[in-house]
Amino acid sequence: MTATAPRKDQRVEFRVSAVDRELFARAAAAAGTDLSTFATTNLRLAAQRALADRTQFTLSAVETEAWEELLSRPPRDLAGLRALLDRPSPFVD
């Protein structure tokens, strides 16, 4: 079964200089696609990169090892936090 592409029912319009328009057109041609597809694909990638640090984290092997080491440590007993958690909840009747 093939996946269907989402319906394109929205427009995004913005102004660019003639120099940028020509650059974008040349890049689209070099990629073997039309300008609209090229712009949509690359704008989507830029948006995903801009939001990546807010939704997912990629760690190197060294960083992953350090993270795993931190997670394997026993929890610290924080007296102030323990006292707070031992108090009755103000939100329960």
Image (cartoon, rainbow, N blue to C red):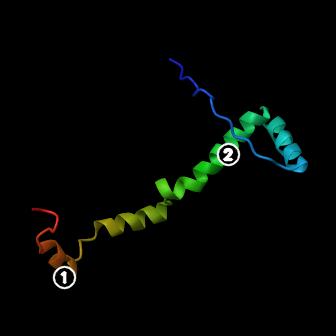
Instruction: Specify whether residue 39 is in view.
Output: yes
Disc 1 element: helix
| Residue 43 x/y as whole percent | 67, 45
Kindly identify which numbered label has been placed on residue 43.
Answer: 2
Side (left or right) of 11 relative to 33: left
Disc 2 element: helix
| Residue 40 x/y as whole percent | 69, 39
| Residue 14 x/y as whole percent | 76, 45
The Cα atoms of the two marked residues, 1 and 2, are separated by 49 Å
Question: Split into 4 quadrants, where in the image is the C terminus?
Answer: bottom left
The residue furthest bottom is: 79
Kindly identify which numbered label has been placed on residue 31.
Answer: none
Q: Residues within 10 Å of mark 2 (few under 14, many from 20)?
A: few
Residue behind mark 1: 79
Q: Residues within 10 Å of mark 1 (few under 14, many from 20)?
A: few
Q: Give the residue type that dot 2 points to.
A: Leu
The residue furthest front is: 93
Side (left or right) of 49 relative to 25: left
| Residue 53 x/y as whole percent | 52, 58
Residue at 41%, 68% in the rendered image: 66
Instruction: Specify whether residue 57 is in view.
Output: no
